[in-house]
Amino acid sequence: MKHNKNLEIMETCLQGNLNLSYRELVEELGKPNTPKEDGGKTDAEWILETPFGVGTIYNYKDGINYNGKEDGTPKEEITEWHVGGNNKETYAYIIGYLKLK
């Protein structure tokens, strides 16, 4: 599984969460995208190709983009991430790949 910023992520939605440091995600998946068209709700996003379809890992409404520098969490300090996809199999695959329970 690898990060592919060119994949289409339309119609994906939240499937679950994971707790992992930003550093660990970067080490495993590379640097994230900086989402452009989400109204500032996210600060970092990985787009992943899985056998079950496209999946995403992203923060949501807790970072600096949404809450500003005073109240937002810098992306490097975020540890709770959302996992999106079109189905629960995508979520399970991503979690399994990252060896989380």
Image: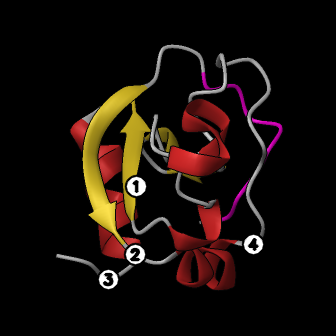
Decide which of tag 2 and tag 4 comes sooner along the chain: 2
Q: Identity of the amino acid at label 3?
A: Lys
Q: How many C-alpha atoms fall within 10 Å of the one at disc 4: few (<14), some, or many (≥20)?
A: some
What residue is disc 3 on? Answer: 99
Side of 101 where 86 appears, left or right: right
| Horizontal and vertical percent position of residue 8 | 70, 25
Please give the count of numbered marks on the rendered protein: 4
Q: Are marks 2 and 1 in contact (CB under 8 Å)?
A: yes
Location of the C terminus by quadrant is bottom left
| Horizontal and vertical percent position of residue 65 | 66, 37
Q: How many C-alpha atoms fall within 10 Å of the one at disc 1: few (<14), some, or many (≥20)?
A: many
- Measured in 3D between alpha carbons, the distance from the residue under mark 3 to the one under mark 1, in whole angstroms, is 15 Å
SS for callout 2: loop
What residue is disc 1 on? Answer: 81
Decide which of tag 3 and tag 1 comes sooner along the chain: 1
Q: Nearer the viewer, mark 3 or mark 2?
A: 2
Residue at point 66%, 16% (across, down): 39
Classify 35 as above or below 93: above
- Measured in 3D between alpha carbons, the distance from the residue under mark 2 to the one under mark 4, in whole angstroms, is 14 Å
